[in-house]
Amino acid sequence: MIRRLMLILTVCCMLTALALGEGASLPIDFTPGVVPVGKNFTATAYRDSTIEVTIEAGRALNCDYWVADIVIQDASQLRTVSAGGFDMDRAMDGVRLANYVNAVLAINGDYNYSTGKNGFGCVIRQGVTYLNNLDTEGHWRSTVMDILLIDEDGDFHALYRPQTGAIGDTIDGKKIINAFTFGPILVDNGEAVLLFNGADSYIDMGAGVKRQRMAICQAGPLHYKAVCCAGPARGSRGMTLREFAELVASLDVQVAYNLDGGDSTVMAFNGKKINDPGNASTRKLKDIIYFASMEGMN
């Protein structure tokens, strides 16, 4: 499976290089990004004419955390990919998956094929709808998780426990490119969200438990941040959802969304996992969110 994935991605990358002209965006499909310029990487940053990434580490509440700040030239550089297809139950090492798609920076996604979601939620990736099965009010599974939509301009839209019929092909007149079902929403309109469903959610996010966590955030047009904290080990105590939401809100973001955490928490940069480096226990991932270069296409 891994060899087949490598071959498909390599061929797609070659075809893209031939087909795309000056000033073009990356295609809205599962084509890899352009190979980053190796000499442009430092230990904590990457920069070319189409993308800039800087990474900082910090500590709060006796817990280590990492923040990646990303600015891109075009919305198509914010991309998603799965280990074997968004309609298939396959997983692989997140760093290897990031390398296959030439990611400058990648983070874990929402574990899109989780059987714990009972077939409910909304999964749209690179413009393709794989699942749009929201529940109805009053049903025992009506506590569907908060959903994050990303439109064709790369803007985030936070939906609180949307119900049947709430999501179509567009949002505010713009095509939906990616939709994630996990959550909860951590920051909305620049303010931390401090009340969570907790036990009412049919997937337990452990709101009051100190855990390793990951968030994807929008700070402004084509400006994003990825934030993760360490788990309760190696000198860190992890964070509750409220603590994590307050930390993320302090980083000057407009919208932030909680992704899969625990041992799924991966921030990959320049071919390496950079978060919680002493943790050898990393779960294989179903999917990643990544930021790609377009250097040489302009």
Image (cartoon, rainbow, N blue to C red):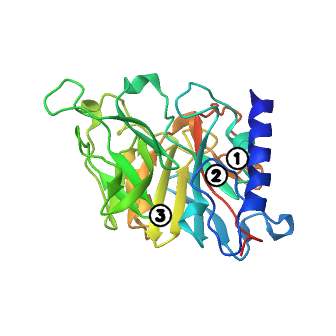
3 or 2: tag closer to the N-terminus: 2
On the image, the x and y values in percent for residue 212 come to: 52, 42
| Label disc, if present, on residue 177 of the rendered structure | none
Q: Amino acid at mark 1?
A: Ala
Q: Amino acid at mark 2?
A: Ala
- Determine crowd level at label 2: few under 14, some 14-19, many 20+ residues with C-alpha closer than 10 A: many
Q: Residue at x 57, y 62 (%)?
A: 76
Which of the pair 138/165 is nearer the observer?
Answer: 165
Q: Helix or strand or loop: what does disc 1 sit on?
A: helix
| Label disc, if present, on residue 106 of the rendered structure | 2
Residue 277: name its quadrant: top right
**Distance of mark 1 from mark 3, alpha carbons?**
20 Å
Q: Residue at x 64, y 70 (%)?
A: 24
The residue identified by callout 1 is 98
Circles 2, 1 touching at the beta carbon (< 8 Å): yes
Residue 61, compared with residue 95, is above or below; it is below
Q: Amino acid at mark 3?
A: Gly
Circles 3, 2 touching at the beta carbon (< 8 Å): no
- Judged left or right of residue 67, residue 35 is right
Residue 263: name its quadrant: top right
| Label disc, if present, on residue 154 of the rendered structure | 3
Q: Residue furthest front?
A: 19
Residue 86, compared with residue 126, is above or below; it is above
Q: Helix or strand or loop: what does disc 3 sit on?
A: loop
Q: Residue at x 64, y 52 (%)?
A: 106
- Judged left or right of residue 182, residue 167 is left
Which of the pair 246/183 is nearer the observer?
Answer: 183
Query: In the rendered image, is residue 262 in sight?
Result: yes
On the image, the x and y values in percent for residue 146 come to: 32, 44
Q: Helix or strand or loop: what does disc 2 sit on?
A: strand
2 or 1: tag closer to the N-terminus: 1
